[in-house]
Image (cartoon, helix red, strand yellow):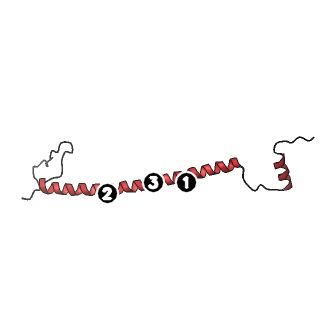
């Protein structure tokens, strides 16, 4: 009785010029896992970029609101230089205020 050696069928097919029709299950699963992880990462990056866009838009709106508020302070108090902690107005050293009454 002849004994079979592991990989004998593959070697015989190779010698006969028969090429495999499919990759191994191990390689298929590894490739599928890598592609799935790549896809998930790309989707996550897309979500982060959308969130970044929203935040940048929000930041732009906040800057516009601050500029409007500074303009209002300039009209009402003569300066927009205010201590953000306690609300103290920091008038210029020369004491002149651009307030029009």
Q: Give the Cα distance between marks 1 and 3.
A: 12 Å
Lower position in the chain sequence, tag 3 or tag 2: 3
Q: Secondary structure at mark 2?
A: helix
Decide: is 68 above or below 37. below
Q: Position of residue 85 (x, y in %)?
A: 21, 42
The residue indicated by pointer 3 is 47
Q: Disc 2 or 1, which lies upstream in sequence? A: 1
Q: Position of residue 7 (x, y in %)?
A: 81, 45
Residue 87 in the image, given as x and y percentages of width and height? 17, 45
Mark 3 burial class by Cα count in 10 Å: few <14, some 14-19, many 20+: few
Residue 11, image x, y percentages: 83, 49
Specify whether 11 is left or right of 30.
Answer: right
- Residue 101 in the figure: left or right of residue 46: left
Which mark sits nearer the N-terminus, 1 or 3? 1
Please identify the residue farthest to the right as the structure is shown.
1
How many residues crowd mark 1 within 10 Å: few (<14), some (14–19), many (20+)?
few
Residue closest to the eye, 99 or 15: 15
Mark 1 in CB contact with mark 3 (< 8 angstroms) = no
Q: Secondary structure at mark 1?
A: helix
At 18% from the left and 52% from the top, the residue drawn is: 80
Q: Residue at coordinates 48% horizontally, 52% vertically from top-left?
A: 44
Q: Nearer the viewer, residue 26 or 72?
A: 26
For marks 2 and 1, give the one nearer the viewer.
1
On screen, residue 54 versus residue 87, left or right, reads right
Q: Quadrant of the C terminus?
A: bottom left
Q: Which residue is mark 1?
A: 39
Quarter in which the N terminus is drawn? top right
The residue tagged 2 is 60
């Amino acid at each position: 009785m002849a004994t079979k050696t592991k990989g004998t069928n593959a070697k015989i097919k190779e010698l006969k010029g028969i090429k495999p029709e499919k990759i191994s299950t191990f390689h298929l699963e590894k490739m599928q896992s890598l592609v799935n992880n790549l896809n998930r990462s790309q989707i996550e990056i897309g979500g982060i970029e959308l969130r970044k866009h929203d935040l940048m838009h929000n930041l732009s709106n906040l800057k516009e609101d601050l500029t409007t508020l500074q303009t209002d302070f300039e009209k009402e108090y003569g300066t927009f230089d205010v201590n953000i902690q306690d609300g103290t107005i920091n008038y210029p050293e020369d004491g002149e205020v651009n307030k029009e009454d």
